[in-house]
Image (cartoon, grey):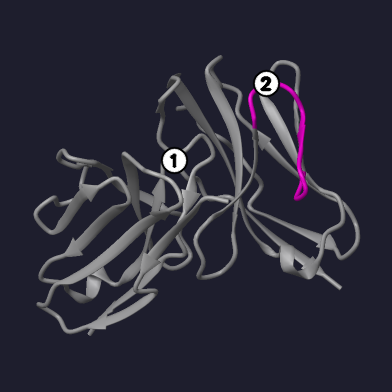
Amino acid sequence: GAVVSQHPSRVICKSGTSVKIECRSLDFQATTMFWYRQFPKQSLMLMATSNEGSKATYEQGVEKDKFLINHASLTLSTLTVTSAHPEDSSFYICSARLDRGIFGQGTRLTVV
Amino acid sequence: DAKTTQPTSMDCAEGRAANLPCNHSTISGNEYVYWYRQIHSQGPQYIIHGLKNNETNEMASLIITEDRKSSTLILPHATLRDTAVYYCIVRAQMTTDSWGKFQFGAGTQVVVTP
Protein backbone atom coordinates (compact mmCIF):
# COMPACT_ATOMS: atom_id res chain seq x y z
CA GLY A 1 0.00 0.00 0.00
CA ALA A 2 0.89 3.68 -0.14
CA VAL A 3 3.59 4.73 2.30
CA VAL A 4 4.93 8.08 3.45
CA SER A 5 8.49 7.98 4.70
CA GLN A 6 10.10 10.61 6.89
CA HIS A 7 13.79 11.11 7.52
CA PRO A 8 15.37 11.36 9.99
CA SER A 9 13.25 9.71 12.66
CA ARG A 10 15.21 11.45 15.39
CA VAL A 11 17.54 14.44 15.37
CA ILE A 12 19.35 16.41 18.02
CA CYS A 13 20.76 19.78 17.10
CA LYS A 14 22.38 22.72 18.79
CA SER A 15 20.48 25.91 19.40
CA GLY A 16 20.86 28.32 16.49
CA THR A 17 21.43 25.71 13.82
CA SER A 18 19.02 24.59 11.10
CA VAL A 19 17.52 21.17 10.62
CA LYS A 20 15.96 19.69 7.49
CA ILE A 21 13.28 17.00 7.62
CA GLU A 22 12.35 15.06 4.50
CA CYS A 23 8.98 13.59 3.68
CA ARG A 24 8.71 11.21 0.73
CA SER A 25 5.71 9.53 -0.81
CA LEU A 26 6.57 6.01 -1.91
CA ASP A 27 4.71 4.42 -4.81
CA PHE A 28 2.47 7.41 -5.39
CA GLN A 29 2.69 11.06 -6.32
CA ALA A 30 1.66 13.73 -3.88
CA THR A 31 0.89 17.17 -5.22
CA THR A 32 -0.06 18.21 -1.71
CA MET A 33 1.50 17.32 1.61
CA PHE A 34 0.76 18.51 5.11
CA TRP A 35 3.13 19.24 7.98
CA TYR A 36 2.08 18.86 11.61
CA ARG A 37 3.71 19.47 14.96
CA GLN A 38 2.90 17.64 18.17
CA PHE A 39 4.05 18.65 21.63
CA PRO A 40 4.08 16.09 24.48
CA LYS A 41 0.63 15.03 25.63
CA GLN A 42 -1.02 17.22 23.01
CA SER A 43 -2.75 16.55 19.72
CA LEU A 44 -1.36 17.16 16.25
CA MET A 45 -1.41 20.76 15.12
CA LEU A 46 -1.42 21.53 11.42
CA MET A 47 1.45 23.85 10.55
CA ALA A 48 1.29 24.20 6.79
CA THR A 49 0.14 22.78 3.49
CA SER A 50 2.90 22.05 1.01
CA ASN A 51 2.03 22.32 -2.69
CA GLU A 52 4.27 20.96 -5.43
CA GLY A 53 5.70 23.76 -7.52
CA SER A 54 4.22 26.60 -5.51
CA LYS A 55 4.50 28.29 -2.16
CA ALA A 56 3.34 26.59 0.99
CA THR A 57 0.28 27.80 2.84
CA TYR A 58 0.91 28.35 6.54
CA GLU A 59 -1.61 28.16 9.36
CA GLN A 60 -2.20 31.19 11.49
CA GLY A 61 0.56 31.75 14.00
CA VAL A 62 3.19 29.64 12.19
CA GLU A 63 6.25 31.64 11.16
CA LYS A 64 6.94 30.97 7.49
CA ASP A 65 10.48 32.32 7.71
CA LYS A 66 11.30 29.95 10.53
CA PHE A 67 9.69 26.84 9.07
CA LEU A 68 10.75 26.72 5.44
CA ILE A 69 8.87 24.28 3.26
CA ASN A 70 9.96 23.15 -0.17
CA HIS A 71 7.96 20.80 -2.36
CA ALA A 72 10.20 20.49 -5.38
CA SER A 73 8.92 17.22 -6.76
CA LEU A 74 5.79 15.11 -6.71
CA THR A 75 7.32 12.73 -4.17
CA LEU A 76 9.35 14.95 -1.85
CA SER A 77 8.57 17.76 0.55
CA THR A 78 11.07 19.15 3.03
CA LEU A 79 10.63 21.15 6.21
CA THR A 80 13.60 23.17 7.41
CA VAL A 81 13.54 24.51 10.94
CA THR A 82 15.82 27.53 10.79
CA SER A 83 17.75 28.91 13.76
CA ALA A 84 16.24 26.26 15.98
CA HIS A 85 15.68 26.95 19.67
CA PRO A 86 14.74 24.62 22.52
CA GLU A 87 11.07 25.64 22.22
CA ASP A 88 11.09 24.16 18.69
CA SER A 89 11.71 20.72 20.17
CA SER A 90 8.72 18.68 19.11
CA PHE A 91 7.45 15.75 17.08
CA TYR A 92 7.05 16.73 13.42
CA ILE A 93 4.81 14.64 11.17
CA CYS A 94 3.99 14.89 7.50
CA SER A 95 1.10 13.44 5.55
CA ALA A 96 0.22 13.16 1.91
CA ARG A 97 -3.21 13.90 0.57
CA LEU A 98 -5.05 10.92 -0.70
CA ASP A 99 -8.67 10.16 0.00
CA ARG A 100 -7.53 8.38 3.14
CA GLY A 101 -4.55 10.45 4.31
CA ILE A 102 -1.26 8.65 4.81
CA PHE A 103 1.02 9.84 7.60
CA GLY A 104 4.75 9.48 8.01
CA GLN A 105 6.30 7.93 11.09
CA GLY A 106 7.31 11.31 12.46
CA THR A 107 10.57 13.06 13.34
CA ARG A 108 11.52 13.74 16.94
CA LEU A 109 13.47 17.01 17.05
CA THR A 110 15.40 17.93 20.18
CA VAL A 111 17.17 21.28 20.29
CA VAL A 112 19.85 21.57 22.98
CA ASP B 1 -14.80 21.34 8.76
CA ALA B 2 -17.16 20.14 11.46
CA LYS B 3 -15.85 19.55 14.95
CA THR B 4 -16.00 16.23 16.78
CA THR B 5 -16.47 15.29 20.43
CA GLN B 6 -14.97 12.13 21.90
CA PRO B 7 -14.59 10.80 25.45
CA THR B 8 -11.21 11.54 26.94
CA SER B 9 -10.42 7.96 27.82
CA MET B 10 -11.73 4.41 27.75
CA ASP B 11 -10.62 1.13 29.20
CA CYS B 12 -11.25 -2.14 27.44
CA ALA B 13 -10.61 -5.75 28.34
CA GLU B 14 -8.42 -7.78 26.04
CA GLY B 15 -10.45 -10.00 23.73
CA ARG B 16 -13.61 -7.95 24.12
CA ALA B 17 -15.08 -5.55 21.59
CA ALA B 18 -14.18 -1.88 22.03
CA ASN B 19 -16.86 0.61 21.02
CA LEU B 20 -15.54 4.15 20.59
CA PRO B 21 -18.18 6.88 20.22
CA CYS B 22 -17.85 10.16 18.37
CA ASN B 23 -20.28 13.05 18.06
CA HIS B 24 -20.23 15.27 14.99
CA SER B 25 -23.59 17.00 15.16
CA THR B 26 -22.64 19.81 12.73
CA ILE B 27 -21.40 17.52 9.97
CA SER B 28 -22.14 18.65 6.41
CA GLY B 29 -23.29 16.57 3.49
CA ASN B 30 -19.87 16.47 1.85
CA GLU B 31 -17.95 15.58 4.99
CA TYR B 32 -16.60 12.11 5.60
CA VAL B 33 -15.93 10.55 9.00
CA TYR B 34 -12.37 9.31 9.44
CA TRP B 35 -10.79 7.34 12.25
CA TYR B 36 -7.07 7.26 12.97
CA ARG B 37 -5.07 5.99 15.88
CA GLN B 38 -1.70 7.01 17.21
CA ILE B 39 0.51 4.73 19.19
CA HIS B 40 3.01 6.55 21.35
CA SER B 41 5.79 8.29 19.39
CA GLN B 42 4.50 7.15 16.02
CA GLY B 43 2.60 8.86 13.22
CA PRO B 44 -1.17 8.42 13.01
CA GLN B 45 -2.37 5.21 11.43
CA TYR B 46 -5.42 5.16 9.20
CA ILE B 47 -8.18 2.85 10.41
CA ILE B 48 -11.33 3.45 8.39
CA HIS B 49 -13.54 6.13 6.90
CA GLY B 50 -17.08 6.49 5.61
CA LEU B 51 -19.69 8.94 4.38
CA LYS B 52 -23.06 7.53 5.41
CA ASN B 53 -22.99 3.76 5.03
CA ASN B 54 -21.49 1.48 7.63
CA GLU B 55 -18.03 0.28 6.71
CA THR B 56 -15.91 -2.69 7.71
CA ASN B 57 -12.32 -3.63 7.00
CA GLU B 58 -9.73 -5.92 8.52
CA MET B 59 -9.10 -3.55 11.40
CA ALA B 60 -12.49 -2.27 12.47
CA SER B 61 -16.11 -1.45 11.72
CA LEU B 62 -17.56 2.03 11.43
CA ILE B 63 -21.21 2.55 12.29
CA ILE B 64 -22.67 5.92 11.28
CA THR B 65 -26.11 6.92 12.50
CA GLU B 66 -28.78 7.64 9.93
CA ASP B 67 -28.71 11.39 10.66
CA ARG B 68 -24.88 11.23 10.50
CA LYS B 69 -24.56 13.22 13.71
CA SER B 70 -22.60 10.50 15.47
CA SER B 71 -20.61 7.40 14.77
CA THR B 72 -19.03 4.45 16.56
CA LEU B 73 -15.75 2.74 15.82
CA ILE B 74 -15.79 -0.91 16.77
CA LEU B 75 -12.63 -2.91 17.36
CA PRO B 76 -14.09 -6.41 17.39
CA HIS B 77 -11.48 -8.18 19.51
CA ALA B 78 -9.23 -5.73 21.31
CA THR B 79 -5.61 -6.70 21.88
CA LEU B 80 -2.94 -5.06 23.99
CA ARG B 81 -1.46 -3.61 20.78
CA ASP B 82 -4.66 -1.63 20.26
CA THR B 83 -3.73 0.63 23.17
CA ALA B 84 -3.47 4.06 21.53
CA VAL B 85 -5.11 7.46 21.13
CA TYR B 86 -8.01 7.22 18.69
CA TYR B 87 -9.00 10.26 16.66
CA CYS B 88 -12.36 10.82 15.00
CA ILE B 89 -12.12 13.48 12.29
CA VAL B 90 -14.59 14.86 9.80
CA ARG B 91 -13.17 16.01 6.52
CA ALA B 92 -14.82 17.57 3.51
CA GLN B 93 -14.45 16.54 -0.11
CA MET B 94 -14.92 19.64 -2.26
CA THR B 95 -14.23 18.09 -5.65
CA THR B 96 -12.86 14.78 -6.91
CA ASP B 97 -9.30 15.98 -6.37
CA SER B 98 -9.83 18.52 -3.61
CA TRP B 99 -10.13 17.57 0.02
CA GLY B 100 -10.23 19.49 3.26
CA LYS B 101 -7.57 19.36 5.92
CA PHE B 102 -7.32 16.82 8.71
CA GLN B 103 -7.93 18.73 11.93
CA PHE B 104 -7.09 16.64 14.97
CA GLY B 105 -8.90 17.00 18.27
CA ALA B 106 -7.82 15.53 21.58
CA GLY B 107 -8.98 12.01 20.74
CA THR B 108 -9.78 9.12 23.08
CA GLN B 109 -7.02 7.38 24.99
CA VAL B 110 -7.89 3.69 24.83
CA VAL B 111 -6.13 1.35 27.23
CA VAL B 112 -6.58 -2.36 26.66
CA THR B 113 -5.93 -4.41 29.78
CA PRO B 114 -5.26 -8.14 30.14
On the image, the x and y values in percent for residue B21 come to: 72, 40
Residue identified by numbered label 2: B68
Cα–Cα span, label 1 and label 2: 19 Å
Share a chain, discs 1 and 2?
yes
The location of residue A14, given as percent across then percent down, is: 17, 84
| Residue in the foreground of this view, choosing between A84 and A94 | A94
The number of callouts visible is 2
Which residues are the magenta region? B50-60
Q: Is residue B2 visible?
A: no
Q: Which residue is mark 1?
A: B103
Q: Main secondary structure of the magenta part?
A: loop
User: What's the amino acid at mark 2?
Assistant: Arg
- Residue type, mark 1 in image: Gln
Q: Residue at x 41, y 25 (%)?
A: B97
- Farthest residue in the front direction? A27
A98 relative position to A46: left or right:
right
Residue at disc 1, secondary structure = loop
Describe the element under mark 2 as helix, strand or loop: loop
The earlier-in-sequence mark between 1 and 2 is 2
**Could you tell me residue B14's position as x and y percent?**
87, 65
